[in-house]
Structures are given as structure tokens and as C-alpha cells.
Image: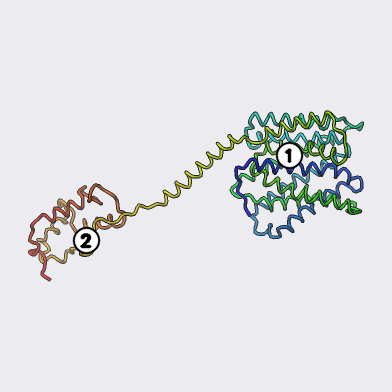
């Protein structure tokens, strides 16, 4: 089913904040689960189960899709899947704080790519939100301390490349949502299966390991259904209402939710880095939410253009229909043929039709006037609905003919 983008920024912001919370809740759970199973296996199982869940909810969602939806779904899945795989592999050679900061740099890469690729101008308030989001990301990651581990430059570059792929994924999804029809649900299903197949190809090299007990299966169910299935679906619908760069800012608030879950569930102590980072991220989110007045003006402009377009189509299809005022009580107008004249050469209508005569024949005049009046129905002054070739009104000619006292019986045969 096609979804036409609608200007509802608050709904889009709520959906994107849910995405951020759903993805943020996945970090501590994944950190706990990867201690007992390989990260490649976890990613493959997570995305495949997410795609299967959405497909079971709507089994016919992939039927009758246009070719473009399949192509864009696979491309989006490859972009995100390659980013996830590269980030997971580089994590072995990077401290988690550095990896988190590098991934968070996508909030800065998104407006830069938007400017380079789509020539999109980013407002100053959005740039301020980008700077605050990056500062909040720094407070949540680097200010909390870096483990005493060696930092691989190659792993850092791979993680930054993954962040660039995430930014491109956000821009492409926003670009697709601007079209006349946007198949959000099947596009999400295709993305999830593509990511699952891609990560599964990396994990299948040494076999797939499944969760060992019930709690691990519960964690995998949360990661698959809530974080992936509902998170990706909410993102697809949310970006139909919010532009790409504000979307990136809203989704970059994942560290806030990670910190909240760590404090509530894992009894982690609240530090200054959490307070400072949370305040900066909150300010960035407030700047990212579209202004109601600006949105109302843009929506009013779009409505005016839409109404004007519909009005133009309606007016173009209208046809002016009037009742023919030249009606006769006794039936249609009499048509006098040339054969009605007893003496054709002396008939006045015939003499006027001769080559070089002063006026055209009345026969051709009536024939032309009838075509004009009945087919074109052009309005004119008074009773004059059509004009002859000489510029005289048909009504005037008929009135002049009526005022003439010509003995017609001299030229016409008796019935």
C-alpha cells in the first residue's frame, strides 16, 4: 500500500524518538548477549527474525510491488548491512567509547552529504542542533573515559565509513519519501531481509550459533521485534514527515536512552558526563523538531498550489453550455434549396451567389450560421450569436429579410 507523505512533523518526531529509544535499548542487551554468542551470528538472526516477523503480520506486503521498490529496498539494506558488518568487525580493534563516537559522527556527515549530493540548504538552527548533538555524543563517549586499549587507525576509518553509510541511508530514505507514493512497509521488509542475508553470509563461515536458554531467546526476541522490526518500520514512516538532517539529530539521541537503561536496569551511577551529555542532546532534539509556524506556512503554500492545480484542471475541463436563443416555435428553421426556384437565373438568392457578387448566397449563409450557432455557440451582443463572413449579424440579416416585401411566390413553385 502506498503512503503519501503528509506534513505532520510532530508525529514524525515521536516516531523517530521511538526509533532512537528502541535502538538505544539494544546496546546494553547486545553487550550482554555477545558474551555468550558471536556478534555476527547475533546480527544475522536478529535481522532475519525481524523481517520474518513483519512478513508474518502482512503476508501479502511483497506482492505486486513496482520494480523500483525492490531495487531501493535492496540498496538500502546493503548500505545499512555493510555498515553494521564493518562496525561489528572494527569493534574488536576499538574501544567501545571510540566506536560509539565514530558511529555518532553520522549526525555531522548527514548534512554534509545532503549539501554535496542533493544541494540541500540546512538552516542555521539545524546546524546548531548538529553541533549540540555531536557535543552530547562526545560527553557520553569520550568524556566517560577510554579503555586502555590500542586504537587501530584502520578500524577507526572502517567505523567512520559505516557512519557515512548510515548517513547515506538516512538521506536516501528521506529522498524516497518525497515521492508521490512511498511503500514504507514492504520497503522495510526488503531491507531487513537484505541485511539478514548479508550478515548471515559473514556468520555462516564458521557455523550459526543459536541462543542457549530462555533468557537469551527473550533478549533476541526484543532485539528482533522491538529494536529491528518496529524500529525500522517507525523510521520509514517517521522520515516521511521529517527531513533527513533533523531525522539524524533525533535518532542520534541513542546515548540518552542507553544511559537511562543503564541507570534503571543495571544500577549504574549517574555522572557528570551523563548530565552534560543529556542536556546537550535534549537541546539538540528541541532544535531538530520542526517549527510549527514554519511548517504551517509551508503546508499552506503546498495547499494553495494543490488547490490552484486542481482548479486549473477543473476549469480546463469545463465547457460553456447555453440554450440556443434562435429557436422557432414551428420547428427548425426552413431551409430553402436552389431547386425551389421556378426560374433559377432570376432567383435573387441565386444571383447573389454568382462569382463576383456583392454578398454570399443566403443558402451558404444559413448553413454557416447554423454550424456556428449549434456547435460553437459563441456569445455575442444582443440576439447576435454569430457573425457572417462580411461582419454582419445573422439576426440583422434575418430581420432585414423579414422587412422586405418581396413577392416570394414569383420565384417559388407552388406546392
**Label of residue 251 in the image:** 1
Residue 124 visible at all: yes
Residue marked by disc 2? 328
Choose top left, top right, bottom left or bottom right for residue 87: top right
Q: Is residue 284 left or right of residue 206?
A: left
Choose top left, top right, bottom left or bottom right for residue 344: bottom left
Q: Residues within 10 Å of mark 2 (few under 14, many from 20)?
A: few
Q: Residues within 10 Å of mark 1 (few under 14, many from 20)?
A: many
Nearer to the camera, 239 or 296: 296
Distance CA(mark 1)–CA(mark 2): 78 Å
Which quadrant: the N terminus?
A: bottom right
Nearer to the camera, 304 or 166: 304
Picture coordinates of residue 280, whole percent (x, y): 75, 30
**Label of residue 265 in the image:** none
Picture coordinates of residue 207, whole percent (x, y): 89, 53
- Labelled pair 1, 2 in contact (Cβ < 8 Å): no
Sooner in the amino-acid sequence: mark 1 or mark 2? 1
Picture coordinates of residue 316, whole percent (x, y): 42, 49
Residue found 86% across the figure and 47% down from its top: 40
Q: Helix, strand, or loop for circle 1? A: helix
Amino acid at each position: 500500500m502506498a503512503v503519501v507523505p503528509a506534513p505532520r512533523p510532530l508525529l514524525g518526531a515521536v516516531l523517530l524518538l521511538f526509533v532512537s529509544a528502541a535502538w538505544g535499548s539494544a546496546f546494553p542487551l547486545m553487550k550482554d548477549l555477545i558474551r555468550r554468542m558471536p556478534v555476527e551470528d547475533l546480527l544475522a538472526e536478529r535481522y532475519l527474525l525481524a523481517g520474518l516477523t513483519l512478513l508474518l503480520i502482512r503476508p501479502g506486503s511483497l506482492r505486486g510491488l513496482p520494480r523500483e521498490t525492490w531495487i531501493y529496498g535492496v540498496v538500502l539494506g546493503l548500505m545499512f548491512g555493510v555498515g553494521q558488518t564493518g562496525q561489528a568487525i572494527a569493534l574488536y580493534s576499538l574501544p567501545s567509547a571510540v566506536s560509539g563516537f565514530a558511529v555518532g559522527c553520522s549526525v555531522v556527515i548527514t548534512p554534509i552529504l545532503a549539501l554535496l549530493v542533493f544541494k540541500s540548504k540546512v538552516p542555521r538552527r539545524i546546524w546548531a542542533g548538529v553541533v549540540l548533538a555531536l557535543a552530547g555524543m562526545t560527553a557520553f563517549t569520550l568524556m566517560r573515559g577510554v579503555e586502555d586499549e590500542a586504537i587501530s587507525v584502520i578500524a577507526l576509518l572502517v567505523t567512520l565509513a559505516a557512519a557515512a553509510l548510515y548517513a547515506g541511508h538516512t538521506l536516501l530514505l528521506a529522498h524516497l519519501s518525497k515521492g508521490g507514493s512511498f511503500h514504507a512497509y514492504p520497503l522495510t521488509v526488503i531491507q531487513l531481509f537484505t541485511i539478514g542475508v548479508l550478515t548471515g553470509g559473514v556468520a555462516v563461515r564458521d557455523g550459526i550459533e543459536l541462543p542457549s536458554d530462555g533468557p537469551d531467546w527473550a533478549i533476541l526476541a526484543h532485539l528482533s521485534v522491538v529494536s529491528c522490526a518496529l524500529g525500522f518500520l517507525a523510521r520509514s514512516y517517521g522520515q516521511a514527515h521529517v527531513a533527513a538532517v533533523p531525522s539524524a539529530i533525533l535518532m542520534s539521541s541513542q546515548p540518552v536512552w542507553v544511559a537511562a537503561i543503564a541507570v534503571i536496569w543495571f544500577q549504574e551511577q549517574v555522572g557528570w558526563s551523563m548530565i552534560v551529555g543529556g542536556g546537550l542532546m535534549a537541546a539538540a532534539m528541541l532544535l531538530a523538531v520542526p517549527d510549527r509556524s514554519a511548517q504551517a506556512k509551508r503546508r499552506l503554500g503546498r495547499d494553495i498550489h494543490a488547490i490552484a492545480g486542481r482548479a486549473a484542471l477543473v476549469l480546463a475541463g469545463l465547457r460553456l453550455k447555453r440554450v440556443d436563443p434562435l429557436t422557432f416555435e414551428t420547428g427548425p428553421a426552413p431551409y430553402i434549396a436552389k431547386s425551389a426556384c421556378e426560374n433559377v437565373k432570376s432567383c435573387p438568392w441565386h444571383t447573389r451567389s454568382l462569382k463576383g457578387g456583392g454578398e454570399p448566397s443566403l443558402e451558404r449563409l444559413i448553413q454557416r450560421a447554423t454550424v456556428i450557432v449549434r456547435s460553437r455557440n459563441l456569445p455575442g451582443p444582443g440576439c447576435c450569436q454569430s457573425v457572417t463572413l462580411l461582419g454582419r449579424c445573422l439576426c440583422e440579416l434575418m430581420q432585414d429579410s423579414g422587412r422586405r416585401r418581396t413577392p416570394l411566390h414569383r420565384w417559388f413553385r407552388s406546392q
